[in-house]
């Protein structure tokens, strides 16, 4: 599992994930993902185009960080998930606590509330 971080126009952070969010993959990025998302208490885009598989352990990681952001009024927007990954996000109910965007421009609009 790979994790990279970019700062987009307007200072919005984008955490880009690639690989399999199975037990091994999720454990390999968990500490850094937590540090780059929930711990900062700032809204963030999580780019998931490179994630080909997500297991319950990956869902748990995402949900834990969403819960850390909520009290601060910050949020996560998932961006460009592959069809299977998007289906899992929706079936698990994560789409009820975080938005899913088709592309980066939409994700930025959702974060800004435009």
Image (cartoon, grey):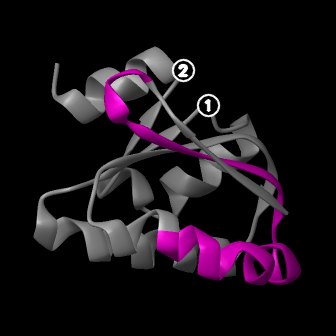
Is 85 rendered above or below residue 93? above
- In which quarter of the view is residue 32 placed? bottom right
Percent position of residue 6, x then y: 58, 39
Which disc number belongs to residue 60?
Answer: none
How crowded pointer 2 is (Cα within 10 Å; few <14, some 14-19, many 20+) is rated as some
SS for dot 2 = loop
Horizontal side of 57 relative to 95 (left or right) equals right
Horizontal side of 14 relative to 58 (left or right) equals left
Q: Tell me which residue sits at (41%, 28%) in the image.
A: 107
Magenta region includes residue 2: no
Is 93 rendered above or below residue 99? below
Is 85 rendered above or below residue 61? above
Magenta region includes residue 23: yes
Determine contact: label 1, label 2, CB under 8 Å.
yes
- In which quarter of the view is residue 23 placed? bottom right
Q: Quadrant of the N terminus?
A: bottom right
Horizontal side of 37 relative to 59 (left or right) equals left
Task: Return the disc, 1 or 2, that comes first in the chain's sequence.
Answer: 1
Residue located beneath label 1 in the image: 80
Q: Tell me which residue sits at (39%, 50%) in the image.
A: 95
**Which span is picked out in magenta?**
9-35
Q: Tell me which residue sits at (31%, 25%) in the image.
A: 10
Q: Quadrant of the C terminus?
A: top left
As rendered, which of 8 and 70 lies closer to the eye? 8
Residue located beneath label 2 in the image: 103
Is 84 rendered above or below residue 97? above
Percent position of residue 97, x then y: 30, 58
């Amino acid at each position: 599992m790979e994790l990279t971080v970019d700062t987009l126009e307007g200072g919005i952070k984008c955490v880009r994930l690639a690989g399999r969010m199975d037990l091994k993959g999720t454990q390999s990025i968990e500490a850094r993902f937590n540090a780059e998302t929930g711990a900062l208490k700032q809204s963030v885009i999580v780019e998931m185009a490179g994630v080909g598989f997500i297991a319950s352990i990956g869902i748990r990681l995402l949900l834990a960080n969403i819960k850390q952001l909520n009290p601060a009024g910050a949020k996560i927007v998932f961006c460009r998930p592959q069809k299977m990954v998007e289906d899992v996000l929706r079936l698990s109910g994560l789409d009820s606590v975080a938005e899913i965007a088709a592309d980066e421009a939409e994700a930025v609009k959702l974060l800004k509330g435009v």
